[in-house]
Every structure is written in structure tokens, then in C-alpha cells.
């Protein structure tokens, strides 16, 4: 495509990736069409009363359509929020249940360890007491010095 007749700033914009001339022209065309439609309504061969009634009807239809869309969006978002809440509640319940089970299991393990420690202590105490009964008591007599 030849760039001979295109101004330099358009060439620079294309090279820099700036939106092209076509999108700007399309925007201007659509804006001009909207202004033209409004002017056609205002200068139409209708009486002022008929024109105002038409504008009011169009505005009313637009407001009603917007309300319907808003209601639809509200219902959809409400359903999604309810669904999200239910899912989150179920997941939190599952995690809480798993945490309770883990705490219970660890508590049981700790209780078993404490019981085992108590049993071991009692066994050792009994064993030491019974061995102390079997051994003769130490005597602490002073030896008489050798007279020799």
C-alpha cells in the first residue's frame, strides 16, 4: 500500500500503533448521524404537541427497557451471589469439620501419650521401690583405726 498521499502525522500514528484514521472517521460519522436524527425530529412537520408526545413515548420506552435490563441483571447477580454463598458455606463447613476431626485426633494422641507416660512412671516407681526393699540398707559405721 502506497503512503504517498497520506500526511506524515498519519504515517507516524500508524507506526506507533495509535488507533487508525478509520476508527476516528467512523466515530465522527456515527456522531453526525445521531445529531442529524435529533435535528430531523425537531424540524419534522409534526406539531409541537405530537413531537413532545413522541419524545416522551420514546423516553418512556427507554426507561422501561432500562428497568427491565436492571431487573434482569439484579436477579442474575442475586442468583449468582446466593450460589456463591451456598458454595462458600459448604466449603467452610467441610474445612471446619476436617479441622475438628484433626483436633480430636491430635487430642486423642496427646491423651494416649500422657497415659503412656503415667504408666511408665508408675512402672518405674514400682520397680525402684521393690528393688529398694530387696537390697539391704546401707550401714555407715566408722571403722576403727588399725592398731598395728
Image (cartoon, rainbow, N blue to C red):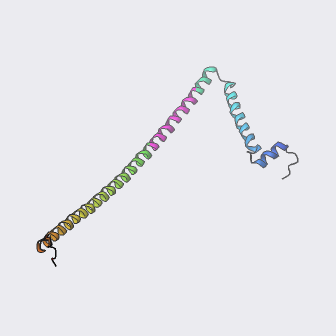
Q: Main secondary structure of the magenta part?
A: helix
In percent of the image, x 68 and y 33: which residue is there?
A: 34
In the image, residue 146 above or below residue 113: below
Decide which of 19, 93 is in the foreground and name it.
93
In the displayed structure, does residue 22 sit left or right of residue 38?
Answer: right
Decide which of 76, 87 is in the foreground and name it.
87
In the image, residue 129 above or below residue 44: below
- Residue 62 located within the stretch drawn in magenta: yes
- Position in image of residue 92 (x %, y %): 37, 51
Span shown in magenta: 56-77
In the image, residue 42 above or below residue 120: above
In the displayed structure, does residue 22 sit left or right of residue 4?
Answer: left
In percent of the image, x 28 and y 61: which residue is there?
A: 105
- Position in image of residue 88 (x %, y %): 40, 50
In the image, residue 140 above or below residue 63: below
- Position in image of residue 61 (x %, y %): 54, 32
- Residue 134 located within the stretch drawn in magenta: no
In the displayed structure, does residue 138 sit left or right of residue 48?
Answer: left
Amino acid at each position: 500500500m502506497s503512503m504517498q498521499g497520506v500526511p506524515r502525522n498519519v504515517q507516524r500514528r500508524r507506526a506507533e500503533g495509535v488507533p487508525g484514521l478509520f476508527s476516528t472517521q467512523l466515530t465522527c460519522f456515527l456522531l453526525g448521524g445521531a445529531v442529524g436524527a435529533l435535528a430531523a425530529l425537531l424540524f419534522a412537520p409534526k406539531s409541537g404537541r405530537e413531537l413532545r408526545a413522541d419524545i416522551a413515548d420514546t423516553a418512556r420506552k427507554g426507561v422501561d427497557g432500562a428497568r427491565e435490563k436492571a431487573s434482569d441483571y439484579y436477579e442474575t447477580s442475586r442468583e449468582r451471589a446466593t450460589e456463591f454463598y451456598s458454595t462458600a458455606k459448604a466449603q467452610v463447613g467441610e474445612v471446619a469439620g476436617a479441622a475438628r476431626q484433626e483436633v480430636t485426633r491430635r487430642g486423642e494422641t496427646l491423651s494416649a501419650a500422657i497415659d503412656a507416660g503415667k504408666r511408665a512412671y508408675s512402672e518405674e516407681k514400682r520397680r525402684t521401690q521393690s528393688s529398694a526393699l530387696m537390697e539391704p540398707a546401707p550401714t555407715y559405721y566408722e571403722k576403727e583405726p588399725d592398731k598395728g
